[in-house]
Amino acid sequence: MKGVFSAPGDFVHFKSQVPLHKIPIGTKQWRYYDFGPKVVPPLICLPGTAGTAEVYYKQIMALSMKGYRVISVDIPRVWNHHEWIQAFEKFLDAIDVHHIHLYGTSLGGFLAQLFAQHRPRRVRSLVLSNTFLDTHSFAAAMPWAPIVSWTPSFLLKRYVLTGIHDGPHEPFIADSVDFVVCQVETLSREDLASRLTLTADAASVGNLLLSDSHITIMDTNDYCATSQQLKDQLSERYSGARQAYMKTGGEFPFLSRPDEVNLHLQLHLRRVGVEARPDLVRGISRDGSGGDPSESNDRKEDSDNPPQDDGGNFESPSTESQLPAPESSEPHSLNELPLSTAKCCFAGQGDAVILLPFPLLREQITVSEILLQLTLVTLVPLLVGWLYITSKHCWKSKQLM
């Protein structure tokens, strides 16, 4: 991990140009970016457990300038796979999108396959990266899944971060890991609990009506949280799919190898018949002009964002944007780590704030640790309150005597 990390310049520019959309649909709140000509069938990007809509910003910027429409979404708070399918279908109806192409990584790839299985008429093609066919192995590795919704935020974040390979990285891979780690810090306890519940909910993808020729499997050959056995199962299921392998890239090739990923995405979209419309792209400028001028967005936006062109007109982004926090560049032992390297985690619903050094967050976590720390976080406040009430009662008794 790098010692010092600040927001990449292209990400800062992305946030200054591409508006963040927020719409409530039923009981679900959707955060997403929608950029590019609206007349083009969209490529919808679904992140993994540790990802947010922001992690695909390099694809949004590059592909939209080529004339493609890219939508990147946050996985909403859903608690089972059936609820995900229903919620995602309502989201597509709300933004008036009928036929889609899905690009999913890790958990996002699994959810993309489930949606393609149950709503085959809407999904035209799939791009799957570092993903899997079933979640039984994850369910077996999370025996504490029934209490995940009660687990404090800092423990959930710690568990998610243990799945990210921690070791010497090439600079571009280290940057991608740092970026995703900072995005994890923006996720709420409910968001993390929901995603881990989806991962631990034992389920398998059934047979798809989608032809293998409309599927691309894009993987890296170095390392990722998805085991090689799960990757091989995916390749065997979709034996006729196009294979796109990258020599390196780590767990987040869309950030570490964006040029290669974007090229594979363009080749996939061309192969499945998506016609780009570069003639509708004005180009990015610092004054906020660009995108598709043909249509305007009449849907509900975040209160910090005035209505904008849903096809890609650039406006000031939401003030909700989360920039990664800097970390200390000096090496320290675990006991000497300064507060500048600490991560601020909110424990449960209360006001308690726990500062944990980042290396501590990355240590391996066990079921017994989770149960012990959950017990301490839950029982200590109750014990303190009981002692306070008891002492107050004794004091009043002495006064009466």
Image (tube, rainbow, N blue to C red):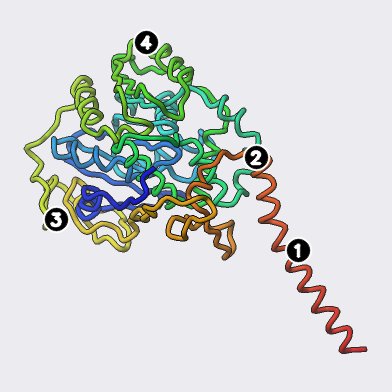
The residue depicted at 72 percent of the width and 57 percent of the height is 379
Q: Earlier in the sequence, mark 4 or mark 1?
A: 4
Residues at marks 3 and 1, CA–CA distance in whole angstroms = 56 Å
Q: Tell me which label, 4 or 3, sits earlier in the chain.
A: 4
**How many residues crowd mark 2 within 10 Å: few (<14), some (14–19), many (20+)?**
few
Q: Residue at x 55, y 59 (%)?
A: 354
Q: Residues within 10 Å of mark 1 (few under 14, many from 20)?
A: few
**Number of marks in picture:** 4
Foreground disc of the pair 1, 2: 1
Coordinates of residue 347 in the picture (x, y in percent): 58, 57
Label 3 Cα crowd, 10 Å radius (few <14 / some 14-19 / many 20+): some
Q: Is residue 257 visible?
A: yes
Element under disc 1: helix
Q: Which residue type carries mark 3?
A: Gly
Task: Identify the amino acid type marked 4.
Answer: Ser
Residue that badge 2 annotates: 146
- Residue under label 3, please give it: 288
Q: Nearer the viewer, mark 4 or mark 1?
A: 1
Q: Amino acid at mark 2?
A: Pro
Q: Which of the two discs, 3 and 2, labels the residue nearer the N terminus?
A: 2
Q: CA distance from mark 1 to mark 2?
A: 25 Å
Name the residue nearer the viewer: 54 or 388: 388
Which quadrant of the figure has residue 224? top left
| Residue 44 visible to the viewer | no
